[in-house]
Amino acid sequence: MTTTALSRSAVLGDTATVEPRIVHIGLGAFHRAHQAWYTARAEDAADWGIAAFTGRSPQAAEELASQDGLYTLIERAADGDSAEIMTVLVEADAGSDVARLKELLAAPQTAIVTLTVTETAYRLGQDGAPDLTDPVVAADIEALRAGRDPESVLGRLIAGLAARRSSGSGGLAVVPCDNIPDNGPFVGTGVLGLAEAVDPSLAEWIEAEVSFVSTSVDRITPRTTDADRATAEDLTGWQDVSPVVTEPFSDWVLSGAFPNGRPKWETAGARFVDDIEPYERRKLWLLNGAHTLLACAGLLRGHQTVADAMADPECRAWVEELWDEDVRHLPESLELPEYRRKLSERFDNGRIAHHLAQIAMESATKLGVRIAPVVLAERAAGRDGAASMRALVAWIRLQQTGAGIGVGIEDAKQKAIDEALRATDPVRALLAVVDPALAADDDIVDAVTAQLKKETA
Ligand code: CS2
């Protein structure tokens, strides 16, 4: 059978598209399995097209543009796959096309900017303040002042917001969808800090007109493989160079204002709440925390994927112990036993090949968000936080294996990690890279050091 490549005219019979009202930055698999999926499922989907920009590499934009934005979404359950062709993405652009970003943000109908760019790509400190000593940030401030195109995600966003101010199109909502606590105010602080350095009157306009919405996002979506491309074609009869494979489960909790409107995402299952913090913590600590523990400890034990590691009774027990610590610091109203049961089921889905090496990327930042707060909360409650600490110990071992297992796993903090490895007290120095509060607690440093000695004896 010869199959045809995906395109709007082939699949839909015409090339008309819905007007883009959402601009996305960070066109990866997760966006297409999550925010795009919710938008396509909303009752008023016909009013909401998405124009998406890549983060670093233009490849995803080139692939998707060649298919008019269409792609196959494969839902991979424990007992089989199902597929649908998604049409909600109406435009795919390279992140470097700042001129187009400005044009879209200046358009009055644009109401929302969503972001999935990874925790580190914001280039912000723990408190959300921009690092003005970061050469990329400093160069962007200069570029923005001089009217040249910036390079960083927030630099580009600010260029777009400046264009919107000039066009008089009014406010919109910025909706960060990365695994960062309080991601709305966090990114808001960063954007305002940068804008202030470029042009204080722009910062004032942003503060008055732009809202920063906090979100907790959830859907396990590993990187697409060649086998997934073949599966997409088998399931739909269309050739797709860029399908997405995801789990059946999905969750989206949001909190904040939308000054220029939004899709009725709640009709697709999203929840709008006043206080997002408990939901965020539940997800970041239980799901992402366990992921990071499994990634670091599982790689050391020779496992490849989350499901492999979960099949190892030792790793599984460590996850349960981690969760026992997490839930002590979460409100009972969050139905934690049910959440844990469901999570184990999701992690056990061996048909989803979620690679530990992918999750282990950027661990220095991830540990600071997912693990450190629980270690500190356990310590403050007079306990040792031994289960959470296991993730820190495993990460330090991964760093110390040098030419071994940890190699090739990207970390934006690699330079600081390498310096810490050469310090007189490397354990304390490495903990400081994750969170200075860990390094400041002698008992934590001693306990981690003792555990490392035991494991490597
Ligand atoms: C994972 C997340 O790679 C990682 O760090 O923990 O991408 C995780 O799969 C998602 O947050 C699930 O919603």
Image (cartoon, rainbow, N blue to C red):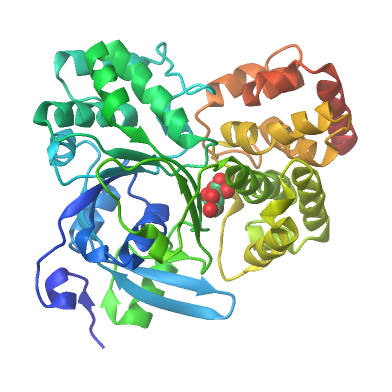
| Image location of residue 116, percent across then percent down | 40, 44
- The image quarter containing residue 173 is top left
- Which quadrant: the N terminus? bottom left
Is residue 440 shown above or below 258? above
Q: Residue at x 21, y 50 (%)?
A: 21
Q: State the residue in front, 72 or 242.
A: 72
Residue 136 visible at all: no
Is residue 353 shown above or below 258? below
| Image location of residue 296, percent across then percent down | 68, 43
| Image location of residue 269, percent across then percent down | 45, 63
Residue 156 visible at all: yes
113 left or right, relative to 285: left
Q: Residue at the bottom extreme?
A: 1
Q: Residue at x 32, y 24 (%)?
A: 207
- The image quarter containing residue 416 is top right
- The image quarter containing residue 276 is top right
Is residue 386 shown above or below 413? below
| Image location of residue 146, percent across then percent down | 16, 14
Q: State the residue in front, 455 or 251.
A: 251
418 left or right, relative to 381: left
Is residue 15 shown above or below 126? below
